[in-house]
């Protein structure tokens, strides 16, 4: 009789200990991206502008066409991304036309974008005025673009691109890291 009680006890124990066997799918996860601390270096050459940029970025000059001597790229090799910086002198180009061209380039991404947010750049002490565009959406090719000017002599346009298929959800920490670097670039930007 004692053996029957023990067997019954274990049978009930195992029967009641079985929990819910429902399957719950795991959410999609992305790899963790370790980001370094922000630190900066100076870009001050014979170019008509100077600024401070991230120590994790590399300046790449246009060494193929040489048609635009003041165009450069800020490359982030560890993130496989580049900010293409193009400069125009307002002595040769109309400011309104350059602003509208920049806006048109941004809104070419509207098909893949969920939203486009505009933010003004206004730094009167250094004569830097402009517009920043945040292009939201998983498949938008360029998540961040901008233009800045002094409204009289200089105009610069920038666009961030990555060298792989866009997946801006997983790249959000990297995009935020680079945008913070660009905020610092605006704050330290000087026209010559």
Image (tube, rainbow, N blue to C red):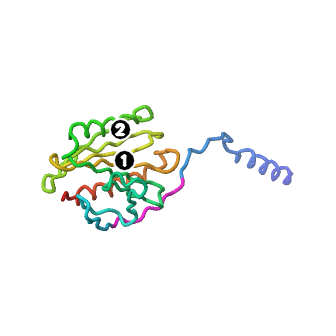
Tell me the residue that label 1 is attached to.
159
| In magenta segment, residue 87 | no
Counting residues from the start of the chain, the first of labels 2 and 1 encountered is 2
**Closer to the camera, 130 or 44?**
44
Q: In this view, does 82 lie to the left or right of 7?
A: left
Residue found 75% across the figure and 48% down from its top: 14
Q: What stretch is highlighted in magenta?
A: 31-39
Residue found 56% across the figure and 45% down from its top: 28
Q: Locate residue 11, reporting x and y percent.
A: 79, 47
Q: Locate residue 20, reporting x and y percent.
A: 66, 41
- Secondary structure category for the residue under label 2: helix
| In magenta segment, residue 37 | yes
**Whole-Å distance between the Cαs marked 2 and 1?**
9 Å
Q: Is residue 164 above or below residue 188?
A: above
- Magenta-drawn stretch, dominant element (helix, strand or loop): loop
Disc 2, disc 1: CB below 8 Å?
yes
- Secondary structure category for the residue under label 1: strand
Residue found 32% across the figure and 62% down from its top: 53
Q: Say which quarter of the image contains residue 111.
A: top left
Tell me the residue that label 2 is attached to.
105
Report the residue that reaches farthest toward the top.
Answer: 111
Q: Locate residue 90, reporting x and y percent.
A: 20, 46
């Amino acid at each position: 009789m004692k053996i029957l009680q023990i067997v019954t006890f274990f049978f009930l124990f195992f029967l009641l200990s079985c929990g819910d066997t429902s399957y719950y799918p795991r959410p999609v996860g992305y790899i963790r991206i370790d980001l370094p601390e922000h630190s900066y270096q100076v870009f001050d050459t014979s170019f008509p502008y100077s600024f401070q940029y991230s120590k994790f970025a590399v300046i790449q000059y246009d060494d193929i066409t040489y048609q635009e001597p003041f165009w450069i790229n800020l490359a982030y090799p560890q993130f496989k991304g580049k900010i293409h910086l193009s400069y125009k002198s307002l002595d040769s180009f109309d400011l309104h036309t350059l602003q509208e061209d920049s806006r048109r380039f941004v809104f070419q991404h509207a098909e893949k974008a969920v939203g486009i947010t505009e933010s003004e750049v206004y730094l009167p002490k250094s004569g830097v005025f402009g517009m920043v565009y945040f292009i939201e959406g998983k498949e938008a090719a360029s998540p961040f673009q901008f233009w800045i000017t002094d409204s009289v002599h200089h105009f610069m346009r920038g666009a961030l691109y990555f060298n792989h298929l866009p997946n801006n959800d997983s790249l959000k920490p990297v995009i935020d890291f680079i945008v913070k670097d660009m905020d610092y670039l605006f704050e330290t930007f000087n026209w010559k």
